[in-house]
Amino acid sequence: MRRNKAISASEISQYVYCPVSWYLKRTGVEPQSFGLKRGIDMHQKAGGRLTLLDRRERAADLFRLLGYFSLIAAILLAGWLLWIYL
């Protein structure tokens, strides 16, 4: 293991994501065992799930924005109709 090496901001990010992965990468361990390969696969699956979640959140944000615009349009239309007919 490299001693007295400064830790970069990206390494902190890697550590927060997965301390075991950070340690193995820092010590230079290559994924040779079944457990390490399984861990890599699990991380890839989790990343795919996070990507899907991100897409769903973006879609929800767009629908929420559409709802706000629809509400504003309905209020303006109601005000205009009240102004014309009253």
Image (tube, helix red, strand yellow):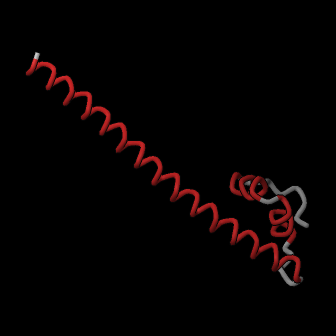
Judging depth in this view, the residue of 80 and 16 nearest the camera is 80
Residue 82 against residue 32 in the figure, above or below: above
Where the C terminus falls, by quadrant?
top left
Residue 67 image point, x, y percent? 37, 41
Residue at (26% x, 33% y) in the render: 74
Where the N terminus falls, by quadrant?
bottom right
Question: Residue furthest toward the front?
Answer: 85
Residue 18 against residue 45 in the figure, above or below: above
Question: Is residue 22 found left or right of 63 in the rendered image?
Answer: right
Residue 65 image point, x, y percent? 38, 42
Residue 44 image point, x, y percent? 69, 72
Residue at (41% x, 48% y) in the render: 63
Q: Which corner quadrant of the image does residue 52 belong to?
A: bottom right
Question: Is residue 83 found left or right of 61 in the rendered image?
Answer: left
Q: Which corner quadrant of the image does residue 2 belong to?
A: bottom right
Question: Residue furthest toward the top?
Answer: 86
Question: Residue furthest toward the left?
Answer: 84
Question: Is residue 35 found left or right of 82 in the rendered image?
Answer: right
Judging depth in this view, the residue of 69 and 74 nearest the camera is 74
Residue at (32% x, 34% y) in the render: 71
Residue at (64% x, 64% y) in the render: 49
Count how many numbered circles sit on residues in the image: 0
Judging depth in this view, the residue of 84 and 46 nearest the camera is 84
Residue 72 image point, x, y percent? 29, 32
Residue 83 against residue 53 in the figure, above or below: above
Q: Which corner quadrant of the image does residue 78 belong to?
A: top left
Judging depth in this view, the residue of 33 and 65 nearest the camera is 65
